[in-house]
Image (spheres, rainbow, N blue to C red):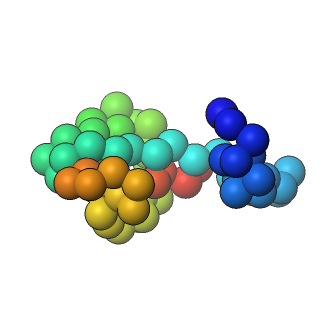
Amino acid sequence: MTGEWNSELRVQETERAQVWIIGNREQVTHLMNEFYVKRIATDRVQFTPIVPAPFATGKYMTVLVR
């Protein structure tokens, strides 16, 4: 990662790990379901709502907070 991004990502030791899923809406939904079925996520409420990715035109994203 570039230094520019490092200054934006403030990480504290008490923060939880995150998995970012980015793709078209169908891909994001499919991966959310796959993570749930494979028990990577124990509940769908662990995912943030699907939102347009601010850094990629036409892409959507969700974050799995573990």
Residue name at image x 44 percent, y 37 percent: 40
Residue 36 in sight from this viewpoint: no
> Is residue 36 shown left or right of residue 16?
left
- Considering every residue shown, the one lying at the far right of the view is 13
- As rendered, which of 9 and 47 lies closer to the eye? 9
Quadrant in the picture for residue 54? bottom left
Residue name at image x 34 percent, y 45 percent: 22
Residue name at image x 46 percent, y 45 percent: 20
x and y percentages locating residue 23 in the rendered image = 26, 43
- As rendered, which of 4 and 37 lies closer to the eye? 4
- Considering every residue shown, the one lying at the far left of the view is 26
Residue 63 in sight from this viewpoint: yes
x and y percentages locating residue 11 in the rendered image = 78, 53
Residue name at image x 26 percent, y 54 percent: 57
Quadrant in the picture for residue 8? bottom right
- As rendered, which of 12 and 6 lies closer to the eye? 6
**Image quadrant for the N terminus?**
top right
Figure disc tally: 0
> Is residue 25 shown left or right of residue 60?
left
x and y percentages locating residue 42 in the rendered image = 44, 48
